[in-house]
Image (spheres, rainbow, N blue to C red):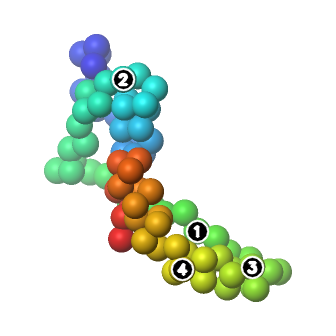
């Protein structure tokens, strides 16, 4: 944005959120999918509390439509 960098490595959703919500500059930086990048996901696991994992899995299924709407509202890429 100040023409001092040619590229940066950061989470696309986080950068777009900060540009839009914190800086008031939506779209000021663009993701370039032709350059090398990685995708990652958050994971939840537990060997001590498997029932908690089952409960959370069920909650994700039961609330999938709401979560998708929330992702769209916030401009996140994780919608299923």
Q: Quadrant of residue 14?
A: top left
Label 3 – label 2 distance at C-alpha? 39 Å
Q: Earlier in the sequence, mark 4 or mark 1?
A: 1
Q: In this view, does 45 lie above or below 32?
A: below
Q: Which residue position holds label 3?
A: 52
Q: Which of marks 3 and 2 is nearer the N terminus?
A: 2
Of tags 3 and 1, which is closer to the observer? 3
Residue 36, position in %: x, y? 26, 51
Q: Seen in the image, is 69 located left or right of residue 44?
A: left
Residue 9 appears in the rendering: no
Q: Which of marks 3 and 1 is nearer the N terminus?
A: 1
Say if mark 1 contacts mark 2, CB within 8 Å. Answer: no
Q: Which residue position holds label 4?
A: 62
What element does badge 4 sit on? helix
Q: Seen in the image, is 59 located left or right of residue 53?
A: left
Label 4 – label 3 distance at C-alpha? 15 Å
Q: Which residue position holds label 1?
A: 43
Q: In which quarter of the image is residue 27?
A: top left
Q: Which quarter shows the C terminus? A: bottom left
Of tags 4 and 1, which is closer to the observer? 4
Label 3 – label 1 distance at C-alpha? 13 Å
Q: In this view, does 60 lie above or below 71?
A: below
Q: Is residue 24 above or below residue 77?
A: above
What element does badge 1 sit on? loop
Residue 2, numbered circle:
none
Label 1 – label 2 distance at C-alpha? 31 Å
């Amino acid at each position: 944005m100040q023409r001092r960098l040619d590229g940066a490595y950061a989470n696309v959703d986080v950068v777009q959120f900060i540009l839009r919500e914190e800086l008031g500059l939506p779209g000021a930086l663009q993701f370039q999918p032709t350059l090398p990048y990685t995708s990652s996901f958050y994971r939840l696991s537990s060997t001590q509390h498997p029932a908690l994992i089952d409960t959370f899995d069920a909650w994700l299924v039961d609330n999938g439509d709401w979560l998708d709407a929330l992702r769209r509202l916030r401009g996140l890429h994780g919608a299923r």
